Image (cartoon, helix red, strand yellow):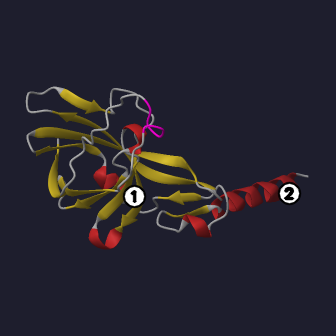
């Protein structure tokens, strides 16, 4: 009986390990509920608080690493390690224009979807602000241990009153630019 329990335990351990894949594995090629893990700790280099100024506005990014983040797609659910970005954007007078760090805005997400080791960059999905305005991709490219460059590529979307009722703020506060340098604080 004891041997059976040991064999069953080893089988369970091996089965769990079989569900773990390197972070950049194509999620469409893995079984449901697989885990895309940051095996080489490549995401860790981006964790921290970063600051930049663009067109007089101060942008502060708060980047954390989340392990086992559940991702839901049409035909698959899987877990992945991801960088999560919360941010604060201030006008030149220091007034807060948008704050996803302290205000719990669950509809605004900015998280990593892929890492490109060959050029030290990470690709992020940005859900956009109210009604999805400004959704698109953000690219962070590591320059040094304390700096990275930022590129934000918003995708176009037509907003109709039916799609976005009321009078929501449809401003995109993140800097729509390329090669903006953020410095670690």
Disc 2 versus disc 1: nearer the observer: 1
Q: Position of residue 86 (x, y in %)?
A: 33, 39
Q: Find out whether residue 164 is within the magenta segment.
A: yes
Q: Find out whether residue 33 is within the magenta segment.
A: no
How packed is label 1: few (under 14 Cα within 10 Å), some, or many (20 or more)? few
Q: Is residue 163 above or below residue 124?
A: above
Q: Position of residue 147 (x, y in %)?
A: 17, 54
Span highlighted in magenta in the image: 161-165
Q: Where is residue 12 in the image (x, y as percent from the top left)?
A: 74, 56
Mark linked to residue 24: none
Residue in the foreground of this view, choosing between 184 and 158: 158
Q: In this view, does 25 lie above or below 7?
A: below
* In-image side of 104 versus 15 (left or right): left
Residue pictured at 17% horizontal, 52% vertical: 146
Task: Identify residue for label 1.
Answer: 41
Secondary structure category for the residue under label 1: loop
Residue pictured at 34% horizontal, 69% vertical: 117
Tell me how many marks there are.
Answer: 2
């Amino acid at each position: 009986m004891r041997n059976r329990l040991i064999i069953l335990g080893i089988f369970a351990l091996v089965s769990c390990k079989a569900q773990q894949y390197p972070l950049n594995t194509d999620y469409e090629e893995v079984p449901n509920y697989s885990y895309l893990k940051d095996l080489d700790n490549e995401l860790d280099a981006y964790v921290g608080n970063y600051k930049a100024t663009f067109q007089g506005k101060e942008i502060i990014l708060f980047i954390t690493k989340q392990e086992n983040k559940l991702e839901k797609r049409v035909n698959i659910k899987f877990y992945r390690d991801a960088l999560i970005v919360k941010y604060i954007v201030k006008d030149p007078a220091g007034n807060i224009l948008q704050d996803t760090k302290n205000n719990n805005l669950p509809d605004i997400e900015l998280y990593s979807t892929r890492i490109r080791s060959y050029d030290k960059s990470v690709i992020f999905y940005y859900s956009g602000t109210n009604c999805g305005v400004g959704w698109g991709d953000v690219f962070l490219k590591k320059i040094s241990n304390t700096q990275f460059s930022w590129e934000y590529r918003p995708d176009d979307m037509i907003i109709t009153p039916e799609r976005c009722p009321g009078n929501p703020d449809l401003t995109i506060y993140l800097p729509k630019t390329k090669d903006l340098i953020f410095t670690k604080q």
